[in-house]
Image (spheres, rainbow, N blue to C red):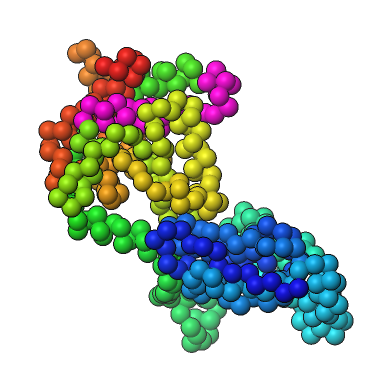
């Protein structure tokens, strides 16, 4: 029985998607609920599961194609008979001897993902060990080959360099005229933005044009936080099975500051100001397709362990493109940590319709004056970008100073003072 695999219902406000990658090729056997392809929207990556077990007999769209809800992506032949029928096709899973002589086995039955990797890295399939069914080369095979050869490549290039130089000298002495050296080539490559990247660009421009953004700065001494982390790190990890990082302290400090200055937790809607009586904190996370901001809902009710666990889960799911629309919707305030990349100071951009965002940066040991004595302390620059339409400089500065005070004396978090 033939079954059409269609584009699933798209999230609210999403009208179309782009085919990002096929995980199966024509002729492949599939099982029910196995992921066949990834669809990229301007917010999340959606998986397309098989509705039944059988054989994928026809792929109707290719990576890069635009599709809408209900469009047919592929045709699946359900049942064991389909698998047997597929096995009877010599071109699909049982290449003939003549076919093997005509072209290398590694070039047969390659999925779009495999072909793309081979093209990107200028590789030949026949030089890579294949582990797939029937000797098919898989994406994992190519990635393993690239990883295994990454360390040996610099040495090989270094060894080849003298030979290349000698050859170049020989050509010059002989008066040979050839093409310019590779390092002198001016190469350009044009690639379309992914949907997520295009949406990020759109929202950043929107934020610049629709809000009166201003940034205020301060500096925080993290000596007390470091002392607590070192003192309780091992027992915390043993009890909660998660590492005690900095983010839980910053989230808790932000919540305390938001409670004192509710306008920072508000948003603009036309001529109205919406005050939010809850604290949904967006945590900026890097993903292979761009920056995403999943939401810690009701952050004021979360323990340190729950905050750390949730952020770790967000990071893992963002890396695997597993975040859902529910993870990304909403949010009343955001935190972004450029310090993980070595940033010393920056001015973060608002995440509309939120009215403020806290920027964390790198921690550096610096000489500071404490009780009239010069001591070495771990210092971090903080930045608060805010919408000056509703947040005055006084509230912004006091808000950031509150975060500084809470972090420099963490006992305030428990006493709420």
Going by the picture, which residue comes out furthest to the top? 371
Say which quarter of the image contains residue 199: bottom left
Left or right: where does residue 237 sit relative to residue 187? right
Left or right: where does residue 97 sit relative to residue 202? right
Q: Position of residue 394 (x, y in %)?
A: 12, 33
In the picture, the quarter occupied by the N terminus is: bottom right
Which one is nearer the viewer's eye here, 127 or 52? 52
Which one is nearer the viewer's eye here, 107 or 356? 356
Instruction: Identify the residue at horizontal 23%, vertical 38% (top origin).
Output: 275
Q: Position of residue 123 (x, y in %)?
A: 64, 70
Q: Position of residue 43 (x, y in %)?
A: 43, 57
Say which quarter of the image contains residue 387: top left
Vertical arrangement, residue 98 with respect to residue 387, above or below: below
In the picture, the quarter occupied by the C terminus is: top left
Magenta: main secondary structure equals helix
Query: Can residue 219 be seen by looking at this rendering?
Result: no
Say which quarter of the image contains residue 248: top left
Which one is nearer the viewer's eye here, 104 or 112? 112
Q: Is residue 117 magenta?
A: no
Instruction: Identify the residue at horizontal 25%, vertical 22% (top origin).
Output: 405
Vertical arrangement, residue 390 with respect to residue 110, above or below: above
Query: Which residues lie in the magenta part?
Result: 235-261
Labels in figure, total:
0
Instruction: Identify the residue at horizontal 19%, vertical 58% (top origin).
Output: 209
Instruction: Identify the residue at horizontal 45%, vertical 25% (top origin).
Output: 303
Left or right: where does residue 293 sit relative to residue 310? left
Q: Position of residue 124 (x, y in %)?
A: 68, 72
Query: Can residue 4 be seen by looking at this rendering?
Result: yes
């Amino acid at each position: 029985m033939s079954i059409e695999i269609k584009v699933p219902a798209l999230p609210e406000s999403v009208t179309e998607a782009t085919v990002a990658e096929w995980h199966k090729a024509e002729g492949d056997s599939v099982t029910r609920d196995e992921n066949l392809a990834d669809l990229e929207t301007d917010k999340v990556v959606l998986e397309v599961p098989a509705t039944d077990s059988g054989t994928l007999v026809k792929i109707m769209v290719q990576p890069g194609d635009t599709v809408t809800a209900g469009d047919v992506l592929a045709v699946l032949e359900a049942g064991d008979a389909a698998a047997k029928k597929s096995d009877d096709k010599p071109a699909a899973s049982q290449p003939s001897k003549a076919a093997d002589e005509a072209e290398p086995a590694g070039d047969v039955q390659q999925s779009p993902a495999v072909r793309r990797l081979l093209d990107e890295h200028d590789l030949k399939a026949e030089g890579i060990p294949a582990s797939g069914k029937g000797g098919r080369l898989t994406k994992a095979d190519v990635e393993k080959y690239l990883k295994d050869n990454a360390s040996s490549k610099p040495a090989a290039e270094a060894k080849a360099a003298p030979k290349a130089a000698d050859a170049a000298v020989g050509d010059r002495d002989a008066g040979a005229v050839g093409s310019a050296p590779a390092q002198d080539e001016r190469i350009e490559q044009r690639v379309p933005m992914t949907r997520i990247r295009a949406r990020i660009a759109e929202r950043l421009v929107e934020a610049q044009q629709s809000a009166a953004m201003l940034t205020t700065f301060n500096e925080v001494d993290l000596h007390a936080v470091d002392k607590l982390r070192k003192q309780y790190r091992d027992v915390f990890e043993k009890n909660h099975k998660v590492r005690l990082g900095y983010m839980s302290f910053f989230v808790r400090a932000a919540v305390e500051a938001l409670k004192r200055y509710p306008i920072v937790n508000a948003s603009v809607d036309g001529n109205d100001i919406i005050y939010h009586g809850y604290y949904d904190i967006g945590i900026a996370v890097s993903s292979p397709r761009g920056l995403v901001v999943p939401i810690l809902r009701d952050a004021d009710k979360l323990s340190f362990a729950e905050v750390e666990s949730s952020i770790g889960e967000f990071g893992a799911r963002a890396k695997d493109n597993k975040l859902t629309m529910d993870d990304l919707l909403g949010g009343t305030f955001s935190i972004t940590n450029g310090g993980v990349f070595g940033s010393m100071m920056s001015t973060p951009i608002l995440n509309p319709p939120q009215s403020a965002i806290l920027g964390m940066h790198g921690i550096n040991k610096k000489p500071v004056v404490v009780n009239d004595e010069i001591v070495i302390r771990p210092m971090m620059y903080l930045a608060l970008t805010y919408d000056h339409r509703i947040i005055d400089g006084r509230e912004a500065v006091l808000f950031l100073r509150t975060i500084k005070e809470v972090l420099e004396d963490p006992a305030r978090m428990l006493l709420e003072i």
